[in-house]
Image: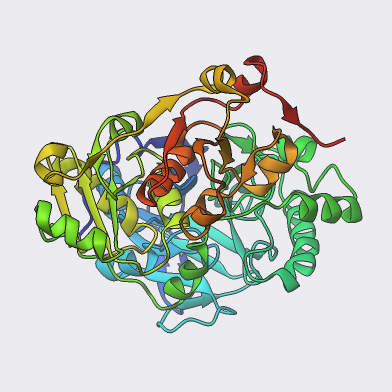
Amino acid sequence: MLLAGDPEQPGHAVRRTTLPHHQIGPAPVPCVGGEAIVGNHEGMQMHEVVTIETPGLGDRSYLVHDSVTAVVVDPQRDIDRMLDAAKAAGARITHVLETHIHNDYVTGGFALARATGAAYVVAAAEDVSFSRTGVGDGDVITSGSLSLTALATPGHTPGHLSYVLRDPDGDPVAVFTGGSMLFGAVGRTDLISPEQAEALTRAQYGSVRRLAAELPDQAAVYPTHGFGSFCSATPTSGDSSTIGRERRSNLALISDEDTFVQELLAGLTAYPRYYAHMGPANRGGPVLPDLSAPQPAGAREIRRRIEAGEWVVDLRGRQAFARSHVSGTISVELSDPFATYLGWTIPWGTPLTLIGDSPRQVTDAQLQLARIGIDRLEAAAAGPVSDLAGERISAYEVSDFEGLAAHWGRYALVVVDVRRPDEWEAGHLSGAVHIPFWEVEQRAGDVPEGEAWVHCASGFRAAIGASLLDRAGRRVVHVDDDWERAARAGLPITTPS
């Protein structure tokens, strides 16, 4: 079945960019894979790029069309968004292009190509288990009046490709850069293996410089990553860019190679643990998931699963969870970061049940999880906590950094910082215990005795950590506040010398 999702709904933004009009003649043009497509569109032809955003994963996918035929770049797994965009444009999808084997999501490319009969274009150098149209450096993909040239841009992955969109005169008008050139930054280079990170970082430097050398200033840049994705090596800036703008601001274009390599490698931070499972899934040719409703669970079934050590995740707002929740459940609020942080925290393969206020919450969460390969839910439930908990209801206090300051120094107060190691090293509360949120379940015993005040940088990850400690039987207080307010509250902060 096709995944549900309206491309215009919040959280699935669609952007449209019109590229210059071109005069197209009727000359036949050979296409990658031995096929031939005849460009037979008289008069003026408009090329449009439709950008489909997935904010929860920090990625963008693209549909490029001329109102007759279309090419898709790096589609997410809910392919109906692409099908809807193509239908709205009146265009037939002829090719689905992957810039690389993705590490942060399960691709929809294989399934979209099967659903539309399109050619599935993947780097010939990649080892995959499915039939595809293999391309390499310099190969040209044509679809109607569209012509894209593959450029080898290794770095983010060894087989990474970028695709240059050209006008009928052969002039580049845009480039789809995947995880190579991002807005002011580049894709991270340590996802394949730590041993290859330096070599890939040097390759990344050369790839971004190649794009800048071969493309004109006015060419638009369309990356897949860099909008919150942990696939970005450093934070990106801006919402759009061109080659000319990148010449002035991109990390790889304003640094010498050794400085770039040293700074990029030193700045790489932790990334979600589920990334380890995305590459193998994508090399296998992932099909569409079954998003039929999971088995309904009542209070007795929920309790049985909790006591069996399974994960039962509550999707409601984190403060609502703190006020009242089924004992033993884990708080992962349903919002943009939901799939990233649940996938990061849960031991991969652990049976998962979702509960929420409404069936719609569960359905939305199920779609988000499918994007990272969590296809099967053991069960689900919706309704008031009192109906789902039987008599096993728990609660804990919520405070902020001012509240923590008011209790600072109190006997048996323990501060637990669940941020990433790089955040901790940049500055932390004096005397705090550092346990990254994804380690809290396994390391609950490392938290000293006392009342545990759990914080992160905004409150979202702290809710996960607090609920895991609460499940372990600890008395907790969830600090639901922005880290910047800690210093203003007068709390003592240890920073690097």
User: From this viewpoint, is residue 478 visible?
Assistant: yes
| Closer to us: 277 or 212 | 277
Q: Is residue 318 left or right of residue 209?
A: left
Q: Identify the residue at image location x=43%, y=37%.
A: 476
Quarter of the view holding residue 50: top left
**Above or below — where is 86 with respect to 97?**
above
Q: Identify the residue at image location x=14%, y=49%.
A: 381
| Closer to us: 487 or 380 | 487
**Above or below — where is 115 with respect to 245?**
below
| Closer to us: 101 or 143 | 101
**Percent coordinates x, y for residue 121 in the rendering:** 46, 70
Quadrant including the C terminus: top right
Quadrant including the N terminus: bottom left
Q: Identify the residue at image location x=74%, y=73%.
A: 195
Q: Is residue 120 left or right of residue 175?
A: left
| Closer to us: 151 or 59 | 59
